[in-house]
Amino acid sequence: MKDYLEKLPKEILDLVYLARDIASSNDMPVYLVGGFVRDLILGVKNLDLDIVVEGSGIKVAEDFAHALNAKLIRHRRFGTATVILESHLKVDFSTARKEYYPKPAHLPVVAPGSLKDDLFRRDFTINAMAISLSSENFGKLVDFFSGRDDLRKKKIRVLHDLSFIDDPTRILRAIRFEKRYDFHIEPKTLKLLKEAVKGKYLERVEPQRVRDDLILMLKEKEPLKEIKRLKELAGLSFLHPRLCVYARNYKLLGRIEEEVSWFENSHFYRRPLDAWVIYFMGLLDCLSPRFTRVVCRRLALRRGEEKRILNAKKHTGKLIASLSRPDTRPSKIFALLEPLSYEEILLIKAEYRNASVQKHIEDFFEIYNGMRILITGDDLRRLGLAPGPYYQKIFTRVLNAKLDGEAPNREVELALIRRLIKKR
Ligand code: ATP
């Protein structure tokens, strides 16, 4: 795999060479593993270096961080460490380990092991390859489970029959990789997956672990494909017994994809967008606010995430009458949309295809949301107004006038505040 490694961006290749040098000075075999190896062979960009050490992952990570003067986070209990570089690149180190699952769907018991043990505990053959970084066989592919052949044949295959029962979150991971790479879950793996679904093993997993994999799914490029396959293979009752997705929900999810890409291709946004939250809103569309809250709480979503998801359920209906009228004034549109999260606004845009709703929301993002008034607190002070809560009221009135096209320049803004002060 040397030739593959040499094609890496220089910054990454330098890190690989550094790991090799540290491995040889510590006399510990060191390997690149997991998704990085998979993507290297596929030619897909992946900057998350994942390194396994037969010996001590923490010791190699310490030397690595020291050499780069980088930040190191150790997890001694797990024998793992993460080095975070100034460039925000992240390198994960772990000590080779074996795992066994005393109870299905619960966390495994872990003990030090060989590279082969470490690869055998992984989810799929395509994620269970390693590349040696030791000087004597630098670049050699270690592939005990024919992962490379499965990559070639585009197959998702588990490493043993109990894989989905040990860790049912692999059901979500199988679907995620299948749809991401346009692979297929090979027949025996599919059979094992369906048996685990039938045995309701997903319901036994700690909900936060389901949440993490579900969020990763919704962060993929085409979440609609993922959700369709999830429904087909696992159903959705593991999230809530009443959760159902019909043709109209798929339609909504498809529109959400369009709106997210519209938003991301424009450059007017001022806050980052959590696109997965909108897909999650779409996914839970058929649930009442009460059951939606139950799902959010069970999955222990963050407070801000839960709030956005519930707000979308409760409040959007009330805004639609005003948004649907072509003659609603910009100041009114701004007042309605400004308190909402971007995720809620884009959900409305996906849900209501009425031309006025579309136009008002586009104007909100493109024009109103960035509009600033020209007068400042200094202007108000100069006009003799003592600082206080009234300032905010004046600013709002001036901004509304500007939004409605009634205050095109600073002079008109000043004239307006003079009138407002007089009326007080
Ligand atoms: P992505 O490209 O989405 O980041 P990844 O394969 O790098 O995918 P991670 O979640 O970062 O995925 O996991 C790194 C590696 O750890 C995987 O490639 C796989 O070998 C292993 N792994 C992760 N989750 C599991 C799991 N639930 N069961 C077994 N092995 C896992």
Image (tube, rainbow, N blue to C red):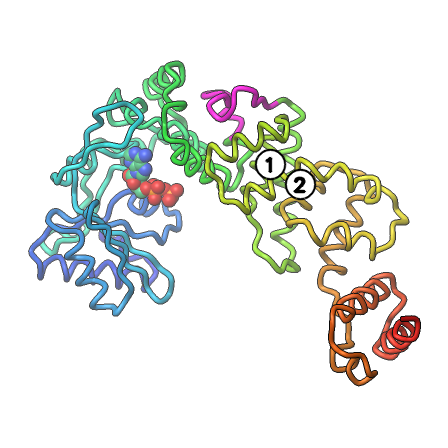
Q: Residue 284 appears at what percent x and percent y?
A: 59, 30
Residue at the location (77% across, 75% down)? 374
Q: Is residue 64 left or right of residue 325?
A: left
- The extreme bottom residue here reads 382
Q: Name the one closer to the observer, 54 or 424.
A: 424
Using the rendered image of the protein, determine whether residue 38 is visible from the camera's viewpoint.
no
The picture quadrant where one finds residue 182 is: top left
Q: Position of residue 421 (x, y in %)?
A: 88, 74
Q: Nearer the viewer, residue 411 or 47?
A: 411
In percent of the image, x 69 and y 46: which residue is there? Answer: 345
Disc nearer the start of the sequence (1/2):
1
Q: Which residues are magenta?
A: 227-245
> Measuring 37% from the left and 50% from the top, which residue is drawn there?
46
Q: Residue at x 60, y 52 (%)?
A: 264
Percent x, y for residue 376? 75, 77
Question: At label 2, which amino acid type do we have?
Answer: Leu
Dot 2 corresponds to which residue? Answer: 347
Disc 1 residue: CB within 8 Å of ligand 1? no
Q: Quadrant of the C terminus?
A: bottom right
Image quarter for ligand 1 equals top left
Residue type, numbered disc 1: Met
Residue 281: image tag: 1
Asked if the magenta segment contains residue 281, the reply would be no
The answer to whether any part of residue 407 appears in the image is yes
Residue at the far left: name it: 27
Neighbours of disc 2 within 10 Å: few (<14), some (14-19), many (20+): many
Left of 412 or right of it: where is 274?
left
Judging from the image, what secondary structure is the residue with disc 1 in?
helix
The image shows residue 159 at horizontal and vertical percentages of 25, 27
Marks 1 and 2 in Cβ contact (< 8 Å): yes
Using the numbered discs, state the Cα–Cα distance from disc 1 to disc 2 in whole angstroms: 8 Å
- In the depicted structure, whether residue 124 falls above or below residue 367: above
